[in-house]
Amino acid sequence: MIAMDSTPKKGGRPRGFDRALAVETAMGLFRRHGYEGVSLAMLIEAIGVAPPSIYAAFGSKAGLYREALDRYAERAPLSLIEADARDLTLDQALAGMFERAIQVVAGDGDECGCMISIGFLTNHPDHDDLAEEVKARRSALVDRFTKELGHWLPRDRCDDVAVFLCAVLQGIAVQAKDGLFLPELRKIAAIARRCLP
């Protein structure tokens, strides 16, 4: 629960409201239970504020989810070309990317899987706008990989390989959510790497 000054204040958030900690707490809940599995009551209890504070800070549960998703994406960016990776072979770049992804999706305790790779694969029609936003993030990763793969591969192969890599990452995220451990997740990545020249 987030500690805060209990001194009453007219309107708005309580004086001690910690927005960053609130987003972090919500991100953990959304990662464990998905958007639709987290109720406003759960958020209120975990963050330790009254509903008006949630609405004043984020506008809605969806607004809080979007901020949590942004925080997650900032913390776990996926790229083949890191700052020092331009001199690597494609296999070395893939090994690094897969290892970073596996470390994120293996998570800690209940916080495993990936908010983007396996988030909003199914949803209530009321949340179609959020589902489209998460889908757009997955598409953006394909686009990023397509562009980066041009460093090693002919342009006409990059899109197919990028789609393949994202499919493997989604599979790894699902397996991590289902409880597969690091050694098994690394084996999946090693097989995927062997599928590429």
Image (cartoon, rainbow, N blue to C red):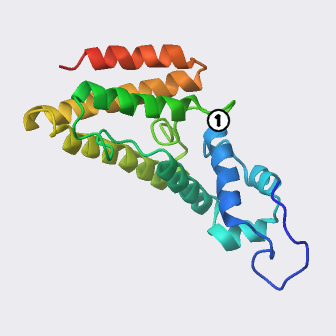
Question: Is 72 situated above or below 12?
Answer: above
Question: Is 187 situated above or below 80?
Answer: above
Q: Report x, y in % for residue 108.
A: 65, 32
Q: Residue at x 43, y 24 (%)?
A: 171
Residue kind at label 1, given as amino acid type: Glu
Q: In this rendering, would 9 be left or right of 25? A: right
Q: In this view, which residue lies farthest toward the right? A: 7
For the C terminus, the image quarter is: top left
Q: In this rendering, would 89 be left or right of 176? A: left
Q: Report x, y in % for residue 63.
A: 58, 62
Q: Report x, y in % for residue 36.
A: 63, 44
Question: Is 143 situated above or below 196?
Answer: below
Q: Nearer the viewer, residue 68 or 43?
A: 68
Q: Quadrant of residue 113?
A: top right
Q: In this rendering, would 44 be left or right of 109? A: right
Q: Secondary structure at mark 1?
A: loop
Residue that carries the numbered disc 1 in the rendered image: 111
Q: Residue at x 69, y 74 (%)?
A: 56
Q: In this rendering, would 45 be left or right of 58? A: right
Q: Residue at x 22, y 42 (%)?
A: 148
Q: Quadrant of residue 135?
A: top left
Q: In this view, which residue lies farthest toward the bottom? A: 10
Q: Residues within 10 Å of mark 1 (few under 14, many from 20)?
A: many
Q: Report x, y in % for residue 13.
A: 76, 75
Question: Is 171 situated above or below 151?
Answer: above
In this rendering, the count of numbered labels is 1
Q: Residue at x 81, y 74 (%)?
A: 14
